[in-house]
Image (tube, helix red, strand yellow):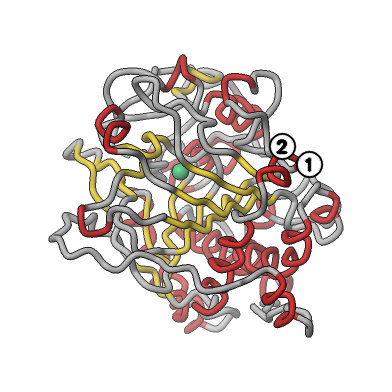
Amino acid sequence: MSAELNSVPSAQSRRPPQAASLDKKYNIRPFKHVHQPSEQIDYANLDAIDLSTFEWGDSDEAKKSRQRLARQLDHSVRTHGFFYLVNHGVDEGIISHLDSISQSIFEVSNEIKAQHLAGSLSSDLDTDSVGAERGPGFKPRQYWNMANGVKDNIEFYNFTQIQHQDKMWEQNHPQIVKDYLNEIANYYQFLHFVVLKQLTILCDIILELPEGTWYENYFQVSQGDISGSGGGFGRLMMYYGHSDEDNEKTNNTWLRGHSDSAGFTFIASQPMVSLQILDYRTREWRYVKHVPGALVVNIGDAVEFMTGGYFKSTIHRVVNPPKSQQGHVRHSIIYFSKPSWVTVIDPDEIDSPLLHRLGVSKPREWEKITYYDWDLEKGRLFGKSKVNDKPGDAPEPVYIHGRLSERWIRDLSV
Ligand SMILES: [Fe+2]
């Protein structure tokens, strides 16, 4: 492990001394998550990776600790593509305060929201730009097309370029976001600079690469160099739920099934039972269980392509929760980590001894593309009526550079 990888940043709070009066100014108060459900739920059986057992350094014991975690992670990435990270170093109080800040951010006036839109007012209008999927700022409700003419009832706020301490201030944020930007960015930066680094080291071990290879080549951040750096964006997301009529028209789906485009997605676990993942062996949906304090992590398309399908970028969706939890707002804090734009996303690029042994290489029908090529087109497709507003769970199949945009059926032999 290189010396650089041995220096571990801490999760110190960067809250300014005047934080208390700021909280008063913006009426920052606890966000009330829904209580646990009273129904019996059929949960997916996901592994929990305990990062408190990850030891840094070159001692035999430290190496063994990482190898143990890598073996556990190997099972998760090859099967569900979803897992928990527990004891990751972020205090639950930090997450609770972000919930509260987010609540107040979404309470700003519609006039202010209109001045800070991430895209236009409808996905179908964002044909030439990256749209609200990728832009900084607010995505309004009714932006995406669901099914049978129903639009989404989700609002979110995107934070872009937050790994770059100067660049993140250049975005057009409303005052409340500016006032809390250091605190919000501190959380996302910790996920990128510490948790993602640990996770990618475990991936190196799985793929039989020198530890640090993935982070240094694909996810490393060079301050100010946006296109040459790894990165990602943060998202605060409010699900307000559908009317009974719209739930019927969408088969209770609040966010249609999709895979994530990026590297690894980190979601702060929250109690509303509504995130489901597709089990490819049984073709059934399984709920993701709430684990207090955990991060729910899933594999994105970029990582699936880089490993030739060894890591699974699993289809997931958000649905109306069980009866005992209905009538509440669902709040989600998400970080989508991304490899650098210039990363070539196929297994020939990463040159893994494990994948060579398994005979995994770039399928001939895949064009040789970068992560930028993929993310741009995938982001543009999301929520478009011509792709989304179709009968059944799956969207219209669309190929991007020779690869299926959403892979609902897959070969599990690798
Ligand atoms: Fe997703």
The residue furthest top is: 386
Separation of marks 2 and 1 at Cα, in angstroms: 7 Å
Front-most of 8 and 232?
232
Front-most of 411 and 208?
411
Tell me where residue 213 appears, x and y as whole percent: 63, 56
Tell me where residue 11 appears, x and y as whole percent: 64, 78
Say which quarter of the image contains residue 215.
bottom right
Q: Is residue 24 above or below residue 232?
A: below
Q: Earlier in the sequence, mark 2 or mark 1?
A: 1
x 54%, y 31%: residue? 143
Residue 257, numbered label: none
Residue 227, numbered label: 1
Q: Looking at the image, do the residues carrying marks 2 and 1 touch, with CB atoms under 8 Å apart?
A: yes
Whether the residue carrying mark 2 lies under 8 Å from ligand 1 is answered with: no
x 55%, y 59%: residue? 200
Front-most of 222 and 306?
222
Element under disc 1: loop
Tell me, yes or no, if residue 83 can be seen here. yes
Amino acid carrying label 2: it is Val
Tell me where residue 112 appears, x and y as whole percent: 73, 46
Relative to residue 406, is residue 29 drawn left or right? right
Q: Nearer the viewer, mark 2 or mark 1?
A: 1
Tell me where residue 233 appears, x and y as whole percent: 64, 50
Residue 342, numbered label: 2
